[in-house]
Amino acid sequence: MSTQTPNTDAESDSPQAERMERKAERDDEARAKAGTDADERQITLKVFRYDPEIPDKQEPRFDTFEVPFEPGITVLDALIYARDTYDSSLTFRHSCRQAVCGSDALFINGSQRLGCQTQVADLDDSETVRVEPLPHRDVVKDLVVDMDHFYDQMESVEPYFSPTEEPDGEQLQSRENREKIKMSTRCIWCGACMSSCNIAAGDNEYLGPAAINKAYRFYFDDREDEQRQQERLEIIEQEHGVWRCQTQFSCTTVCPKDIPLTEHIQELKREAVKQNLKFW
């Protein structure tokens, strides 16, 4: 066994040690610079305000809040900061903060988005963030809109599994059928698609992309029988159903779960034609 002690001075003077030391210094400088930039940068948050219950706030307006920028900050984070720091009466919906509950759908810099999913740094204009309630919905207060009509439209397509006869036991779904309807099951009922749809804005009875997507999910579920499938088709091919869609793709563009809504509507149109073809 060697009794020689390690020469620590020699190791610290090695080229590798010097490179590691310089790298550590550069990393420290980069972290310090990033911290300084984040501290200095501010987000100008312009938020729609309206409160019908307070006379001084019944006229719609925009309030401006300065919010410190931090890497990874979302629009929802900025709203929460503004509420907690400047004005506790600022009202908006949010829940899970993981793009699952769909409650914080907003009109951000001119587009329907989820506040919790939208990072400020990813916006085209990250210096000034304009936040408004979803268009084409009645405003209850500030950024909160009335969702009752949206829920009524969703309910009108009977969005639940309901075969004509109760199965004897467990019904297994094939892998192929699961793959076909997989994307349609991702809807989180946020209402962004409905808000972006010009047809829905002009036709209050139009089922809308979210409800039709929900109908797609159950129409193509092969665990329901043909009679139930025909009943579902009669709902979606009604006067204010799939035929109102003008294939503008706005719903598909804003969907936070990347559901191909327009494609689903078109497929149901083809299905309606196919099922009603008659040969004499």
Image (cartoon, rainbow, N blue to C red):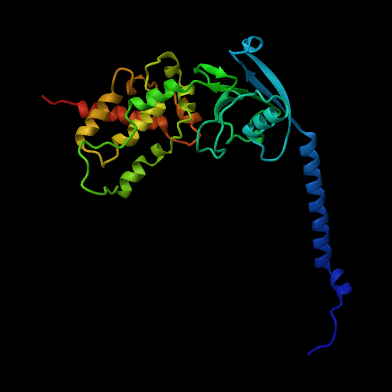
Residue drawn at (50%, 29%), measured in percent from left and top? 254
Q: Does residue 10 show up?
A: yes
Q: Is residue 164 above or below residue 241?
A: below
From the viewer's perspective, is 37 left or right of 242? right
Of 40 and 249, nearer the camera is 40
Q: Is residue 63 above or below residue 73?
A: above
Of 98 and 208, nearer the camera is 98
Q: Quadrant of the C terminus?
A: top left
Of 170 and 21, nearer the camera is 170
Percent x, y of residue 195: 48, 22
- Quarter location, residue 212: top left
Q: Does residue 208 show up?
A: no
Of 73 and 183, nearer the camera is 73
From the viewer's perspective, is 179 left or right of 115? left
Q: Is residue 218 above or below residue 172?
A: above
Residue drawn at (33%, 18%), measured in percent from left and top? 240
From the viewer's perspective, is 144 left or right of 47? left
- Quarter location, residue 268: top left
Q: Residue furthest right?
A: 9
Q: Quadrant of the N terminus?
A: bottom right
Residue drawn at (67%, 37%), measured in percent from left and top? 73
Q: Residue furthest bottom?
A: 1
Residue drawn at (24%, 33%), measured in percent from left and top? 229
Percent x, y of residue 277: 19, 26
From the viewer's perspective, is 193 left or right of 159? right
